[in-house]
Image (spheres, helix red, strand yellow):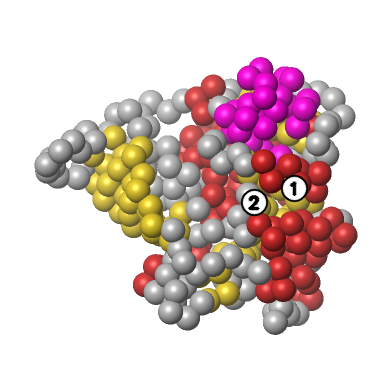
Amino acid sequence: MPMTFPASHNYDVVGLGVSTVDILALVEHFPTGDDTQPALAMGVQGGGPVASALAALARLGARTAMLDALGDDWRARQILDEFAALGVETRFIVRRPGQSSGLASILVQAGSGQRAIVYSPKNAGDLLPEELPAALVQGARFLHLNGRHWAACLHAADLARQAGVRVSFDGGAGRYRPDLRQLLPLVDICIVARAFAAEYTACDAIRPAAQALLAEGPSLVVITDGVNGSWVFPKAAGSFHQPAFCMPQVVDTTGCGDAYHGAFLFGLLRGLPLRQTAALASAVAALNSQALGGRAALPSLPQVEAFLRAQVG
């Protein structure tokens, strides 16, 4: 049955996606054959695009709640404990007795930041449309999703649109699938990797791809491209390029795109102009590259503001 909650428990952003546990190792080189080497650093953190975007939002001070279906294993406990420490609401996450949650092993090459990922998908299944807490979704300011829990995702987007809740979509590199074309007309804020934009629109050039995505229905399209920065296209007018903040040394780029998404939504929540919002998002992504894992270096709002002041000082 759908869960209910008091009307006073509205959230800034409700996220619907898949949460994982990431086991990370920083290595001199990727293993070949019967290779053995000491890790330069290791860590265990939560992961998942929507989940880490909510972590970034919570770190900045937003009220967030996660929707997902997890098992009842140690991985689920790790995921829930980390969410709790960050301040992300977890009581709407469904638990499946006897099932497992997602796990990923990530090797990060020192210096280059290149990653090799091996993962074990969860078997807890998708969150079902009838398990969605409709009042939670319709009481939020934003619904953030990336197409996981597909039937529930479409239902949640429809619920949000009915209530005037803005829908945010994360299209990651390598995550395009044709059925996502059903979702884009329900999306307001579309932030996608350049590779996703190219696959979706069959166009490699930034501006034509953005225009094609805007024609699908969103009022704002952002195309991200790592160290090349991001391009912001509001439907009205005034598109611009936001350069990336290149740090002197990058430890790990895991989760930087997710951090960008979360920070961009935070800027919109605060009513910042789009140029300030894009700068904030780029700064959070850059700062997040300074430690191993997708969440270890997520900055607080004062830290981001100090970083941005230093860039213009």
> Residue 183: percent from the left, percent from the top?
74, 47
> Residue 297: percent from the left, percent from the top?
43, 46
The kind of residue tagged 1 is Leu
190 drawn magenta: yes
Quadrant location of the N terminus in the rendered image: bottom right
Q: Mark 2 points at which residue?
A: 147
> Residue 54: percent from the left, percent from the top?
58, 55
| Corner quadrant of residue 9 | bottom right
Report the front residue among 283 and 44. 44
**Residue at 69% across, 61% down:** 151
Farthest residue, direction top: 205
The kind of residue tagged 2 is Gly
Q: Is residue 62 visible?
A: no
Residue density around tag 1, few if under 14, some if 14–19, many if 20 or more, within 10 Å: some
308 drawn magenta: no
**Residue at 12% across, 42% down:** 34
Q: Is mark 1 on a helix, strand or loop?
A: loop
Q: Is mark 2 on a helix, strand or loop?
A: loop
Report the front residue among 70 and 8. 70
Per the model, the C-alpha gap separating discs 1 and 2 is 8 Å
116 lies left or right of 139? left
**Residue at 60% across, 28% down:** 194
110 lies left or right of 309? left
Image marks 1 and 2: residues in contact by CB distance under 8 Å:
yes
- Residue range (magenta): 187-213
Question: Mark 2 or mark 1, which is nearer the start of the sequence?
Answer: 2
Report the front residue among 232 and 155. 155
Q: Mark 1 points at which residue?
A: 183
